[in-house]
């Protein structure tokens, strides 16, 4: 989608949200998104075994392109070992519905890490940031989990679609930065983030049209040596 079109849609959504703020509708009780600083250097712990990274000798970060977004049908959780699986999260520390509930079931330790991070951090500092959680030691599912903090709350108190989209770019950029830092810090046989997969974030419970989220993701600039693209894996419909 053209950036201009997206900007226009976001402005119109923000205007609608602000007009309706005093009503009792589900999305109306959230103030417009404030610009927030990104989470500086979250602590990461990896107990996982090794895998080589073809990009590990590239360290420059000059901007060269925008993020490539490809789509296919499949199950996100069928990703190969060391894949980063990305999903959208609220800032309250809850993964109780939708694909988040499946993440909680498959990666209980990652859920604890996410939940503790939320309990320790004010939502206004979390929104627009990300969390990278390395694979759980001894787990049969060796996946990194990437949390995009794109809504302060969930359910009836979730942020408006415009606010969620506004938080999406900063959150995804923060996650890509964390991946770059993580991979650069892994030495020798340590395991690095391999492929990057995500579900159609926001398109279910957060009720943001997927095309809008995809447009934001495709506008993210990436540098040489950064993650170049993300593979979006969606369940077959019907
Ligand atoms: N195995 C699989 N493989 C591939 N795609 C799969 C899949 N399973 C489901 N999908 C798809 O994954 C997309 C996202 O759909 P979701 O509605 O879940 O997430 P969302 O991003 O709209 O919203 C986030 C809030 O959902 C939770 O809510 P709670 O806080 O727990 O209440 C969180 O915590 C957040 O707050 C939809 O396209 C699903 O078809």
Image (cartoon, grey):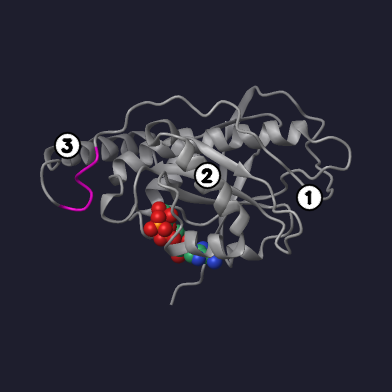
Q: CA distance from mark 2 to mark 3?
A: 32 Å
Q: Is residue 98 left or right of residue 28?
A: right
**Label annotation for residue 15:** none
**In the rendered view, does 147 fall on the left or right side of 154?**
right
Q: Is residue 88 magenta?
A: no
Q: Point out which mark residue 18 bears.
A: 3
Quarter of the image where one finds residue 226: top right
Tell me where residue 162 appears, x and y as whole percent. 30, 41
User: Residue 238 placed where, x, y %?
Assistant: 43, 77
**Residue visible at 78% across and 50% down?**
48
The residue that disc 1 covers is 48
Residue that extends furthest to the bottom in the rendered view of this protein: 238
Would residue 234 be visible to someone looking at this image?
Answer: no
Residue at 42% from the left image edge and 63% from the top image edge: 97
Q: Badge 2 local density, few (<14 within 10 Å), some, or many (20+)?
A: few
Residue 57 at x, y percent in the picture: 82, 31
Q: Quadrant of residue 131?
A: top right
| Prevailing SS of the magenta stretch | loop
* Residue at the image position 26 percent from the left and 33 percent from the top: 32
Decide if residue 78 is on the left or right side of residue 119.
right
Find ligand 1 in the image and state its quadrant.
Answer: bottom left
Measured along the vertical axis of the image, is residue 104 above or below residue 194?
below
Structural distance between the alpha carbons of marks 1 and 3? 46 Å
- Helix, strand or loop at disc 1? loop
Asked whether mark 3 and ligand 1 are closer than 8 Å, the reply comes as: no
Question: What residue is shown with label 2?
Answer: 116
Give the label, 2 or 3, closer to the camera: 2
Along the polypeptide, which appears first: circle 2 or circle 3? 3
Residue range of the region highlighted in magenta in the rendering = 25-30
């Amino acid at each position: 989608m053209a950036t201009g079109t997206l900007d226009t849609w976001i402005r119109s959504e923000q205007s609608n949200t602000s007009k309706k703020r005093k009503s009792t509708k589900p999305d109306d009780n959230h103030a417009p998104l404030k610009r927030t600083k990104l989470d500086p250097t979250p602590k990461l712990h990896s107990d996982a075994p090794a895998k080589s990274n073809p990009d590990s000798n590239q360290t420059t970060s000059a901007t060269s392109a925008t993020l490539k977004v490809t789509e296919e049908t499949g199950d996100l959780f069928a990703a190969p070992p060391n894949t980063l699986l990305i999903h959208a999260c609220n800032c309250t520390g809850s993964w109780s519905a939708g694909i988040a509930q499946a993440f909680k079931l498959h990666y209980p330790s990652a859920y604890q890490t996410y939940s503790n991070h939320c309990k320790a951090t004010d939502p206004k500092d979390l929104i627009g940031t990300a969390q990278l959680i390395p694979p759980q030691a001894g787990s049969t599912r060796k996946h990194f989990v990437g949390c995009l903090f794109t809504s302060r709350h969930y359910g009836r108190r979730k942020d408006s679609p415009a606010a969620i989209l506004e938080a999406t770019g900063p959150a995804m950029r923060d996650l890509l930065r964390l991946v770059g830092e993580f991979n650069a810090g892994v030495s020798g046989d340590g395991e690095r983030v391999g492929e990057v997969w995500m579900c159609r974030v926001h398109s279910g419970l957060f009720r943001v049209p997927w095309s809008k989220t995809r447009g934001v993701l495709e506008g993210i600039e990436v540098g040489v040596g950064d993650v170049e693209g993300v593979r979006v894996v969606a369940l077959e419909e019907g």
